[in-house]
Image (spheres, helix red, strand yellow):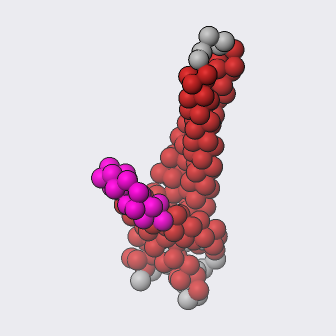
Amino acid sequence: MDGKIKNAKSTLKILGILSILLGALAILLGAMSIGGGGVLAGGIATSGGMSSADAETATMVTGLVLVGGIVLLISGIFTLLLGIFSVRASNDFSKVGPAYAFALIDLIVSVVGVIVNFAGTMNVSSLLEGVVGIVFAACIFWAAKTIKDYNAGGGNPGNGQLPPQ
């Protein structure tokens, strides 16, 4: 059983660190997208030489850029929190609850995303990206659940460290 817990602890820590990095990158890209959408909107507002059809198209693109940036920002915050909670849980098993909850939500959202993508576009690269997301979320969920079950069985000495051999 100790080997399983060691694997879960390592998995949670490694994937948690990766989630922190990916979340920070997504937050940065989302903020840049929102800022870029604002600049684009300002450029549209000040240019008077556009036809009405071009202005409508540019306005729609600006809206899509802003919405995409907001979605990316929210996703990045979620991923960052998942990573922080995962690393924290790998260091102190008694704090596995938030990591478990975030991993479960991430797994559900990833599965729904693949189903929606498969029903809509059936694009192979998007489908592979979704499958990688499911595997990533499932690994974090497995590790958090293993540690949670270990705690429930009374195996946690209280400090997140494995009991002495």
Residue at 53% in and 83% down: 149
The residue most toward the bottom is 153
Percent position of residue 119, x then y = 40, 62
Image quadrant in which the C terminus is located: bottom left
33 falls in the magenta region: no
Q: Is residue 58 left or right of residue 142?
A: right
Image quadrant in which the N terminus is located: bottom left
Q: Is residue 6 visible?
A: yes
Q: Looking at the picture, does residue 65 appear above or below residue 117?
A: above
Q: Which residues are magenta?
A: 112-129
Q: Is residue 132 visible?
A: no
Residue 31 appears in which quarter of the rendering?
top right
Q: Overall secondary structure of the magenta stretch?
A: helix
* Front residue (pair 104, 87): 104
Q: Looking at the picture, does residue 164 appear above or below residue 111?
A: below
Q: Is residue 22 left or right of residue 44?
A: left
